[in-house]
Image: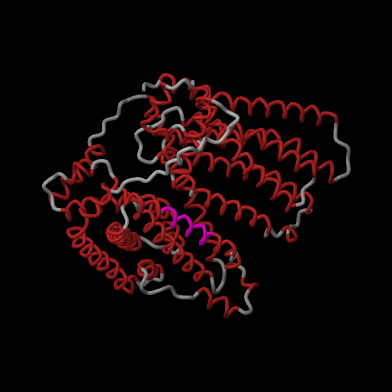
Amino acid sequence: MRTVLDLLKPRLWPLLHRRPTGSTRQYVRLAVVTTVAGALWIGVFLVSLRVLTHFSTIEQIGALLNYKLLNMLMVTALALLVFSDILTALSKLYLARDLPLVHALPVPAHRIFLARWTEISFDGSWMVFAFTLPVFLAYGMVFDQGVVFGLVLLAVLIPFALLAAAFSCLLVLLAVIVIPATRMKNIFILLGLLSFVAVYLAIRMARPEQLVDPEVFDSVLTYVASLRTPSSPWLPSTWAYNALHAPLEGTPARGLLDMALLWSGTGVLLFVCVGLADACYFRGYSRTQAAGHKFRRRPAGTTRRRSMFTGPLRALLDKEFKTFWRDQTQWSQIFLIMALVVIYVYNFKVLPLEKSPMPTVYLQNLLAFLNMGLALFVLTAVTARFAFPAVCSEREAFWIIKISPISIRSFLWIKFCIYFLPLLILTEALIVITNTMLNVAPFMMGLSVLTVFAMVPGIVALGIGMGALNPNFRTENPAQAVTGFDGLLFMIFSTAFIGAVLALEAGPVYHYFIAQLRHRPLPSHWYLRTWASGLVVVLLCIAAAWVPMAIGQRRLERKGV
């Protein structure tokens, strides 16, 4: 046990002995991150409390709805934990940079595995539980629970996370015997994305909002029977649900058996993993180190494809496209974007506009105006995933860019051009398709298209420029750059930019449609206000596209090779 603790010390020492530098940037970063995380946590809690309270007011089936929601939450948490733990296990057990040093120590393989399993259990589960904890807290308040529910929750979530980590490690240990970890990680990422897309589409197309509408069922008995559909007794999520369901009904002793299943299942899986680690962990690690990467060579006698660009500019563009398509974690995200587009469009298709007490024409154009904000928020999320880590993705080869005959300014604007056109097409497609479904007025269609066309460069430039402020070229996963402080600032500035533009356009748009509904002419001051708002919007878009790129350029030019 002491050897395992010694192996964990390099992970614990930076946390226990960290000293504040006293810099203003550090305190500002801590304050912003704490505020945003706290606001998000409180928001999840308030929404959960509102939903559960509303369900509780429904006679006869209110409690069943809450229990069904809890069951769905545990199933979703289990799926997220297993997928997250598989990716974390591949990195911690086979791909981490400190593994050559660790395996050179006179330590048995099973103790190295136990230390890594401890890290995997924490790294793979803290995010899931951080955002499900407010939901459990809301359950405790709605069902008027006290300390007993808190203790049961703690006794359930700990083995739940440990069991998911042990099961994931068991799968990884067995899989790496056949396929090296470097390729296995790409396979798991691709399969996980495809599975998520399939499940996500299936759930949305099933229209789960009908769950709270008994009118869609033939009878109340059919509706209640659908809510009482049991889950598989072999799933750990069912054991966790039963253990939490018992104190909510006032009989905590009834969940002791399921709690015992969680703890004993964790112990059995961990025992199997330890035995398997002694037998094949080091062999799988050796196979991973020996596995090479295959690159396709251009056949002799072939020539490069023609391009409108020449010299270093063409070389950098070719490099960007090849890097994107060679990195499976990059191009596989296209499947998620396609699913997002399908669900986004489908949500507008099933809107019950005919049931609204508001005039249909007014409601259609109101939704079209709000649709601009939603589409731009989608653009912000996609930009954060692709454009923001574009500079960081150069990694330790950034010195080649520094000594190349291409200026940092050209380098950043090439990055901008690569992502600008695809993101513009994506956002405009969302706007045009959804507005066509809403059958909006030509004025609203034109305004939406022009606004998006003007704002896309600003949001993409914000992503590229702010990603160049403090790039970490030594990171193993550049996509994680957006989870840092600069990524949070990008989301904040992008949201503020979108909100400012929509606020400037809201007044003229509102008065225009009110005049159309009441068949009144537009007042003369409307034209002056519209031109003034349009001018400010144009200036904002130009500033958003130029200022971040200029600041990022200066920061990169001052950065050493």
In this view, the residue farthest toward the left is 106
Q: Is residue 362 positioned above or below 152 on the image?
A: above
Q: Is residue 324 positioned above or below 267 on the image?
A: above
Q: Nearer the viewer, residue 384 or 134?
A: 384
Q: Which residues are magenta?
A: 189-200
Q: Is residue 358 positioned above or below 250 on the image?
A: above
Question: Most prominent secondary structure in the magenta stretch?
Answer: helix
Q: Residue at x 74, y 38 (%)?
A: 447
Horizontal side of residue 370 vs 530, given as left or right:
left
Q: Which quadrant is home to the C terminus?
A: top left
Q: Nearer the viewer, residue 414 or 197?
A: 414
Horizontal side of residue 388 vs 180, given as left or right:
right
Horizontal side of residue 263 vs 559, given as left or right:
left
| Residue 400 is covered by the magenta coloring | no
Q: Residue at x 44, y 59 (%)?
A: 141
Q: Residue at x 49, y 35 (%)?
A: 320
| Residue 190 is covered by the magenta coloring | yes
The part of the image, by quadrant, that contains residue 461 is: top right
The part of the image, by quadrant, that contains residue 273 is: bottom left
Q: Position of residue 90 (x, y in %)?
A: 31, 51
Can residue 198 be seen from the camera position used here? yes
Q: Position of residue 508 (x, y in %)?
A: 76, 35
Can residue 147 be seen from the camera position used here? no
Q: Position of residue 148 (x, y in %)?
A: 33, 63
Q: Position of residue 189 (x, y in %)?
A: 42, 53
**Number of callouts in the render?**
0
Q: Nearer the viewer, residue 337 or 133?
A: 337
The part of the image, by quadrant, that contains residue 152 is: bottom left
How is the model colour-coded? secondary structure
